[in-house]
């Protein structure tokens, strides 16, 4: 084989070896996002909730208030205890690890959550969560807030000690 032919063949192989990775990247980039969910080959994926409203029927919204800040907590509530009346100025999501929690909103919505259920919290609506079960209620809570903005605003108390926002 002549030197010129070898050089041409070598360039062809180099082009081909570059073409395949570029094609692969282009195909991945053009694929719908649902394809990427299938990448969890060794994991079992279970959908808990897909919704555009919270448990009280409010449409979900994502306020733009500043620098994003996520807070993740595990909350443990003994039987009979409650959160007290409060509201959230930022979106909040939770997952019940154990027990049960009954939440009542100021406009009369009442919803009971039990182990294994997600909670899509109400936004800017006073509510109170009470452990209505016989064991500790535990939940993982994610506040998707902003630096300098409180995740929880407690109801103001009146002079006699009753909460004014019931």
Image (cartoon, rainbow, N blue to C red):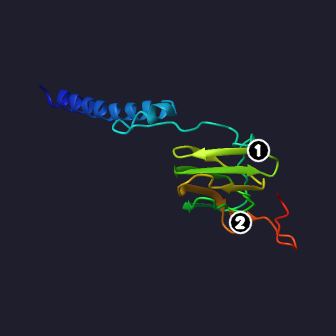
Q: Which of the two residues, 100 or 87, is positioned nearer the viewer here?
A: 100
Question: Vertically, is 38 above or below 67?
Answer: above
The answer to whether 118 appears left or right of 65 in the picture is left
Query: For the view shown, which residue lies furthest in the bottom direction?
Result: 159
Of the pair 13 and 100, the residue shown nearer to us: 100
Look at 75% across and 65% down and name the residue there: 154
Q: Which mark is residue 149?
A: 2
Q: Mark 2 and mark 1: span between their CA atoms?
A: 26 Å
Rendered view: 145 above or below 109: below
Q: Helix, strand or loop at disc 1?
A: loop
Above/below status of 47 relative to 132: above
Quadrant into which the N terminus falls:
top left
Mark nearer the N terminus (2 vs 1): 1
Which image quadrant for residue 26?
top left
Looking at the image, which is closer to me, 144 or 18?
144
Compared with 44, 76 (above or below) is below
- The mark found on residue 109 in the picture is 1
């Amino acid at each position: 084989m002549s030197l010129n032919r070898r050089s041409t063949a070598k360039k062809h192989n180099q082009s081909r070896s570059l073409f395949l990775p570029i094609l692969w990247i282009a195909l991945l980039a053009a694929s719908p996002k649902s394809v990427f969910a299938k990448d969890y080959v060794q994991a079992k994926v279970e959908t808990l909730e897909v919704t555009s409203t919270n448990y009280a029927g409010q449409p979900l919204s994502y306020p733009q208030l500043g620098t994003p800040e996520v807070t993740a907590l595990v909350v443990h509530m003994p039987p009979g205890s409650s959160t007290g009346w409060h509201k959230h100025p930022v979106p909040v999501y939770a997952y019940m690890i154990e027990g049960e929690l009954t939440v009542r909103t100021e406009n009369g919505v009442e919803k009971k959550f039990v182990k294994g259920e997600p909670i899509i919290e109400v936004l800017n609506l006073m509510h109170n969560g009470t452990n209505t079960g016989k064991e500790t209620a535990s939940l993982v809570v994610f506040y998707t807030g902003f630096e300098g903005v409180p995740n929880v605003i407690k109801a103001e108390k009146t002079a006699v000690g009753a909460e004014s926002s019931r």
